[in-house]
Image: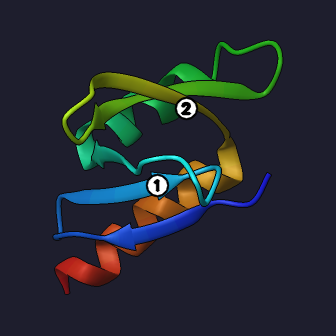
Amino acid sequence: MTLITTVVSHRTIEIQTDPLAPPLLVTRTALITASKAMQSSEDGLAEVKGRFPRLGAGHAFLDESQISELIGDLNRAAS
């Protein structure tokens, strides 16, 4: 699955799993929480929770490398 990402600030990032779908706004805290949950995951995926603009709460299932990459993107934005 290809992710389309846009860093909004040093604390938030937008992710899209489909170019036609609205972006899911995810915080650094949600990514870290999902990363910790990954340790007990049997299928190698973790649920990342966020918010869709004007649509409310949402989630995406990402693997460890995707979560690490997003956290790295936010770290680069913070420096």
Name the amino acid, label 1: Ile
How many callouts does the rendering have? 2
Nearer the N terminus, badge 2 or badge 1?
1
**Image quadrant in which you'd find residue 77:** bottom left
Residue 23 lies, in percent from the top left, at: 40, 51
Label 1: element kind: strand
Mark 1, residue position: 15
Q: Nearer the viewer, residue 54 or 35?
A: 54
On screen, 1 above or below 19? above
On screen, 57 above or below 32? above
The answer to whether the residues at label 2 and label 1 have Cβ atoms under 8 Å apart is yes
**Image quadrant in which you'd find residue 10:** bottom left
Mark 2, residue position: 60
Name the amino acid, label 2: Ala
Q: Which mark is residue 76?
A: none
- Residue drawn at 16 percent across, 70 percent down: 9
- Residue drawn at 80 percent across, 12 percent down: 42
The colouring scheme, among rainbow, by chain, secondary structure or one colour, is: rainbow
On screen, 7 above or below 11? below
Q: Quadrant of the C terminus?
A: bottom left
Q: Residues within 10 Å of mark 1 (few under 14, many from 20)?
A: many
Q: Residues within 10 Å of mark 2 (few under 14, many from 20)?
A: some
Residue 71 lies, in percent from the top left, at: 42, 60
Would you say 1 lies left or right of 10 here?
right
Residue 62 lies, in percent from the top left, at: 64, 38
Toward the bottom, the furthest residue is: 79
Tell me the CA gap for discs 2 and 1: 9 Å
Residue 40 lies, in percent from the top left, at: 65, 13
- Residue drawn at 63 percent across, 49 percent down: 17
Label 2: element kind: strand
